[in-house]
Image (cartoon, rainbow, N blue to C red):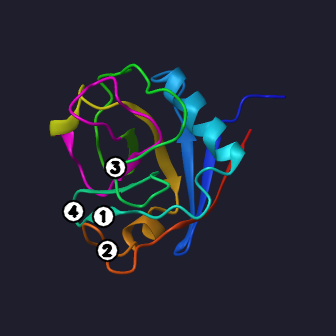
């Protein structure tokens, strides 16, 4: 089986196609694709969406306090800039605490560069990310209906 090159998120606002970047973060891409293929992200909400900054999801509890049963990942920081459409891993203050939560930059956020692991970039459907309800948490959060990988 060939390696997946894209992650497709079907949101309740529409589809988002993300080009995976194993060249930047092979372990994080492997984690995201494994969880997507297991159905882990299906039904999970974007619990933190800040206008002009980012949309964060990937916590099965919808609180921002949890992750998958897999161990946390060591950081794979790079010089890749956090600009609009970039997908990066959320974490605690511990740089090696990324697990299943991720965020998509709604605008440039280069102050995050070299501190968070970039693993992909939106190549189609950014308008559907922009359409997610805003808030921390949003009153009626947008959700990932289905996540799947494509070669």
Question: Would you call the spot at circle 1 few (<14 residues within 10 Å), some (14-19), or many (20 or more)?
Answer: many
Q: Which of the marked residues, 3 or 2, is nearer the chain's N terminus? A: 3
Up/down of 113 relative to 83, above or below: above
Numbered mark located on residue 101 in the image = none
10 Å crowding of disc 3: few (<14), some (14-19), many (20+):
few
Check disc 3 and report its element: helix, strand or loop: loop
State the SS at label 2.
loop
Residue 98 is covered by the magenta coloring? yes
Between the C-alphas of marks 2 and 4, the distance is 15 Å
Q: Position of residue 96 (x, y in %)?
A: 33, 23
The residue that label 1 is drawn on is 49
Residue under circle 3? 65
Look at 40% across and 47% down and name the residue there: 66
Depth check, front residue: 44 or 77:
44
Q: Start and end of the magenta stretch?
A: 90-110
SS under mark 1: strand
Disc 2 or disc 4, which is closer to the eye?
2
Q: Do residues under tags 2 and 4 come within 8 Å of each other at their CB atoms?
A: no
Farthest residue, direction left: 111
Kindly identify the residue that appears in the image at 28 percent across and 34 percent down: 81
Residue identified by numbered label 2: 138
Viewer-nearest of labels 4 and 3?
A: 3
Q: Earlier in the sequence, mark 1 or mark 3?
A: 1
Instruction: Please tell me whether residue 120 belongs to the stretch shown in magenta.
Output: no
Choose the circle earlier in sequence order: 2 or 4: 4
Q: Main secondary structure of the magenta part?
A: loop
In the rendering, at what x and y percent does residue 27 appear?
52, 22
| Cβ–Cβ under 8 Å for marks 2 and 1 | yes
Q: Which residue is mark 4?
A: 52
Q: Residue furthest right?
A: 1
């Amino acid at each position: 089986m060939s390696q997946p090159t894209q992650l497709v998120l079907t949101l309740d606002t529409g589809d988002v196609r993300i080009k995976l970047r194993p060249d930047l973060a092979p372990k994080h891409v492997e984690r995201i694709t494994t969880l997507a293929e297991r159905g882990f992200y299906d039904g999970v909400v974007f619990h933190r969406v800040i206008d002009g900054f980012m949309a964060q999801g990937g916590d099965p509890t919808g609180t921002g306090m949890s992750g998958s049963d897999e161990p946390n990942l060591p950081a794979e920081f790079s010089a890749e800039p956090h600009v609009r459409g970039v997908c990066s891993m959320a974490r605690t203050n511990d740089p090696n605490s990324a697990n299943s939560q991720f965020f998509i930059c709604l605008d440039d956020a280069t102050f995050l560069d070299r501190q968070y692991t970039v693993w992909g970039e939106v190549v189609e459907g950014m308008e559907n990310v922009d359409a997610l309800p805003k808030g921390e948490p949003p009153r009626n959060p947008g959700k990932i209906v289905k996540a799947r990988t494509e070669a």
